[in-house]
Amino acid sequence: MSAILLIEQVLNGLQFGVMLFLMAAGLTLIFGVMGLINLAHGSLYMVGAFAAAAAAAATGSFALALVAALSAAALAGVLIEVAVIRRLYDAPHLDQVLATFALILVFSEGTRWVFGSFPLYLDIPDALSGPVTLPGGIQYPLYRLALIGVGLVVAAGLWWLTQRTRLGMQIRAGKDDREMIAALGVDISKLYTLVFALGAALAGLAGALVGAIQSVQVGMGEPVLILAFVTIVIGGIGSIKGAFIGALLVGLTDTLGGIFLPLILTVAMAPEAAAQTGAALASMLIYILMGAVLVWKPTGLFGGARPA
Amino acid sequence: MIPERLVTIGAVAGLLAVALGAWALGEIFTITLATRAAILALAATGLNIALGYGGLVSLGHAAFFGLGGYAMGILAFHAQSYTPLELGSLTIEGTKSMPVIWLVAVCVSALAAWVIGLLSLRTGGVYFIMITLAFGQMFYYFAISWSAYGGEDGLPIYLRNSFPGVDTLVPVQFFGLCFAALVLALLLSARLRSAPLGLALNAARQSPARVAAVGISPTRVKLVAFVISGAITGLAGALYADLNRFVSPAMFSWQLSGELIVLVILGGVGRLAGPVIGACLFVTLEHWLGGLTDFWHVWLGAILLGVVLFARGGIVGLLTGKAGPHV
């Protein structure tokens, strides 16, 4: 097993992890501030990917596709926040699960209605296509490297937004005591819509960016949504730092486990059996990681003292 | 307003009447739909014990449904291919006998529910929802990547399994088996609701601190309920696999977990008849709307939003005039 393979897979894991972070950050922000579990977050990811694919097909520009993804997802976010989500903030979790599950059905089938069942394709822009040579002579796709960069920039931007701006101060205050900041004259309902739109835009961005390396299709959001849930359970619900660490852990575990677990098992087993057992075990690895974190710290690595 | 007991008896009798009516008229397809409704109602009755009585929002009950299905699939697969199942030094013969398969399905899903419950009950609320969802997904991916039993393609079983004294190949007789299982589960569920365990569970949902103060561990009560709940849903999975004579990873899919919750909510959370009415309504909608448009899930979603936002308490709530369960 060569060092080059290892570095490539670590980079793949990082790329997967930062994209997961874009999803998980929105989820954890929405849960932290509004106390809402949003199953429809994966639908916003899908909306972003479809908007990007449609815009790229119409204009041929990847930059415009990203703009379309961000605005379509944010718009869809505002729309469902005002029409549905707003009524659920004080509702029990069960109602939130149901209503957002209903939204998934509406979004998925609605998209199938408009775009059909066949996957769409979104091309990597010319400027970012092709491999790049890293120090040490490793060839790595430039686009994937760019994704890691985008993810890190967004993470830094979110940190700056929540820790260093007035809006971030209101968001953090909203987490701790919503009555108090309403009493201090902050329009809480507008703040909630804004936070929801921000989370939606991040999901849409992730959908568009990942859509260029996978196909854009109905139902693409839910597997990512569930991984994002695993991520924020590991990181601690409500914590953006937790979401970041959790996303990297999940991304690396999933990628490295899928490659190396079958290899490691060949030491103890026949190659064919090792490949099969390895693949089956690797698919369970992140859930085992989640279970282990829960045994150790039930509220996640950076979660509060009490489960929410 | 109608008393709940009447609603329950009416719902169960209605399902039986539809199947018997269809049998008298020779409408085989309607009998199959009624069987499907009975099995989904059984699965949802299981979920209702955790969700309705215990307030445990499990978004991973497909795990138990799928385990029941695969218990049937794997045993019947080894029986039809005449190969024993090798588990290390242990050799198990496959079987086509329903009682044995059911027993295995119930035990396996109860065991899985115990492990999942033990881990996810360490936390509560929204963590519980996400963790059960994640464990359900774990089984889904495991089933996909486990190629020995069909992997992504699933596992067809050529002949329906047998039950002593019943010709399971006759649709109405198979319906009878599923219906009997449903009635037994409903009786168990009704008994449980008024038993000490059910009362403690109901109290643990509303006020865990007070339950703990009188010396009962709320977590243990919830865990026992979760295990019973998973076992019943697992039995439903074995029956469902026999209805379709096919098991696939789709039985583990999170959409199925979501749909099971939908059944319970449509009917009425924590009501005995809730899962039965919900399942009948769901199968009817699926058949009727699915015949009208390929995109019937849009309308299901819209109906669901309407129920959550405006009709708390589901159909049983509307019929009995009480929004919440009055256990």
Image (cartoon, coloured by chain):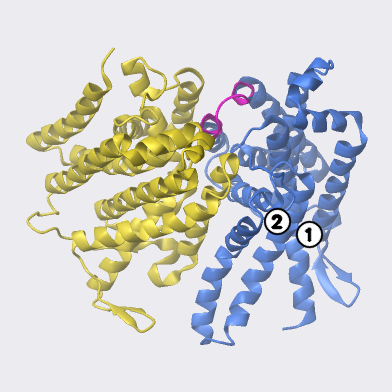
Chain colours: A blue, B yellow
* In this picture, residue B14 sits left or right of residue B165: right
Which segment did they paint magenta? A86-100
Instruction: Give the label on residue A144, or none.
Output: 1
Mark 1: which secondary structure? helix
Q: Is the residue under label 2 in contact with that under label 1 (CB below 8 Å)?
A: yes
Q: Quadrant of residue B38?
A: top left
Q: Farthest residue toward the front?
A: B214
- The Cα atoms of the two marked residues, 1 and 2, are separated by 9 Å
Measured along the vertical axis of the image, is residue A277 above or below residue A166?
Answer: below
Quadrant of the image containing the N terminus of chain A: bottom right
Let me know if residue B200 is in the magenta part. no
Please state the total of marks drawn on the protein image: 2
The main secondary structure of the magenta stretch is helix
State the residue at coordinates (80%, 54%). A147
Mark 2: which secondary structure? loop
Q: What kind of residue is marked 1?
A: Arg
Neighbours of disc 1 within 10 Å: few (<14), some (14-19), many (20+): many
Q: Position of residue A145 (x, y in %)?
A: 82, 60
